[in-house]
């Protein structure tokens, strides 16, 4: 199959490129990146997706939120499934994704690793068992170049808790929130520094005991492996919304 890597000059794009080159199921790679120099590559690389001449079977995107409309337009116009790994989308972006998924296969996940997606399931189970008895706090840690906070993964974990307990609000950072903690909230805390790839902790805090579920990413290769796995799985899928739990058969 042929893959288009969106954001190929970025940190993740470069790792995805290497991962695709080593995957025997992929026999063609095209790149798009607003700031790439096509002369640096032995494959076709474009600054604008509208100039892509080759036909492809799937898009893998690790770029920026602002690129979403271009990716969606290309994907719908050419009926090419897309694997959206970029994080930091707002309500309008999510509405755009929802609309597109009626016409083409759209995959989106804030975290492409097997471990984190299993953690989402575990957190949902823990929330079912402990949610009524505990205060939930989420702590996420990332490198000092990350542009969004809280992380897409932290939002996935909060959503897993919310799926089991009605009426929870996210409280980011607790700045100025000196009053007593209420039961209907999830505390969300972001740490940024150095080269931390990604650490996530979900704490179920009760009186005199704490249950913590935790995941640590040791390198970014796990996200690229997951993205390529998803792209191979997505090729030829009918219109709809998909995520990593579909790819891993964990639903
Ligand atoms: N889902 C996951 O598992 C996962 C894992 C890691 C990173 N991410 C997310 O992936 C995204 C990219 O991360 P990164 O560390 O590679 O960032 P990066 O800044 O290193 O790379 C982004 C690339 O996008 C390019 N770009 C910028 N604007 C563009 C545009 N309008 N059109 C096309 N290309 C454009 C940049 O030139 C750059 O090469 C972030 O949102 C990050 O949070 C997701």
Image (tube, rainbow, N blue to C red):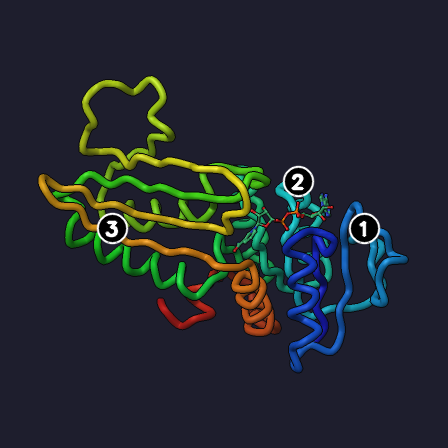
Label 2 packing within 10 angstroms: few (<14), some (14-19), many (20+)? few
Of the two numbered discs 3 and 1 in the rendering, the one whose residue sits closer to the viewer: 3
Left of 136 or right of it: where is 68?
Answer: right
Earlier in the chain: of badge 2 and badge 3, it is 2
- Pointer 2 with pointer 1, Cβ within 8 A: no
Q: Where does residue 149 sit, x and y in percent of width and height?
A: 48, 37
Earlier in the chain: of badge 2 and badge 1, it is 1
Label 3: which secondary element: strand
Left of 118 or right of it: where is 106?
Answer: right
Distance CA(mark 2)–CA(mark 3): 35 Å
**Does the residue tagged 2 have its C-beta within 8 Å of any atom of ligand 1?**
yes
Label 3 packing within 10 angstroms: few (<14), some (14-19), many (20+)? some
- Residue 47, label in figure: none
Q: Nearer the viewer, residue 47 or 69?
A: 47
- Residue 36, label in figure: 1
Of the two numbered discs 2 and 1 in the rendering, the one whose residue sits closer to the viewer: 1
Distance CA(mark 2)–CA(mark 1): 16 Å
Q: Nearer the viewer, residue 203 or 245?
A: 203
Q: Nearer the viewer, residue 229 or 166?
A: 229
So how many labels did they put on this image? 3
Give the residue at the far front of this rendering: 194
**Does the residue tagged 1 have its C-beta within 8 Å of any atom of ligand 1?**
yes
Residue bearing the label numbered 3: 212
- Up/down of 187 relative to 180, above or below: below
Residue bearing the label numbered 2: 66
Left of 122 or right of it: where is 95?
Answer: right
Label 2: which secondary element: helix
Q: Where does residue 241 sit, x and y in percent of width and height?
A: 50, 59
- Pointer 3 with pointer 1, Cβ within 8 A: no
Distance CA(mark 3)–CA(mark 1): 42 Å
Of the two numbered discs 2 and 3 in the rendering, the one whose residue sits closer to the viewer: 3
């Amino acid at each position: 199959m042929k893959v288009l890597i969106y954001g190929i000059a970025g940190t993740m794009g470069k790792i995805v490129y290497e991962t695709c080159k080593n995957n025997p199921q992929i026999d063609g790679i095209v790149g798009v990146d607003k700031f790439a120099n096509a002369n640096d590559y032995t494959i076709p690389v474009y600054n604008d997706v509208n100039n892509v001449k080759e036909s492809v079977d799937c898009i893998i995107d690790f770029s920026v939120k602002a690129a979403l409309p271009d990716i969606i337009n290309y994907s719908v116009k050419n009926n090419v499934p897309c694997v959206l790994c970029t994080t930091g989308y707002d309500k309008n972006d999510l509405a755009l994704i929802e609309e597109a998924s009626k016409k083409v296969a759209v995959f989106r996940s804030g975290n492409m690793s097997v471990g984190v997606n299993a953690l989402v399931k575990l957190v949902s189970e823990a929330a079912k068992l402990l949610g009524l008895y505990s205060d939930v706090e989420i702590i996420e840690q990332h490198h000092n170049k990350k542009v969004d906070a809280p992380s897409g993964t932290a939002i996935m974990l909060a959503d897993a808790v919310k799926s089991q307990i009605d009426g929870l609000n996210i409280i980011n950072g607790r700045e100025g929130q000196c009053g007593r903690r209420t039961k209907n909230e999830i505390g969300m805390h972001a740490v940024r520094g150095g080269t931390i790839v990604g650490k996530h902790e979900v704490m179920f805090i009760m009186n005199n005991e704490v249950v913590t579920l935790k995941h640590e990413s040791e390198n970014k290769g796990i996200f690229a492996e997951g993205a390529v796995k998803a792209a191979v799985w997505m090729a030829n899928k009918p219109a709809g919304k998909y995520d990593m739990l579909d790819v891993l058969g964990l639903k």
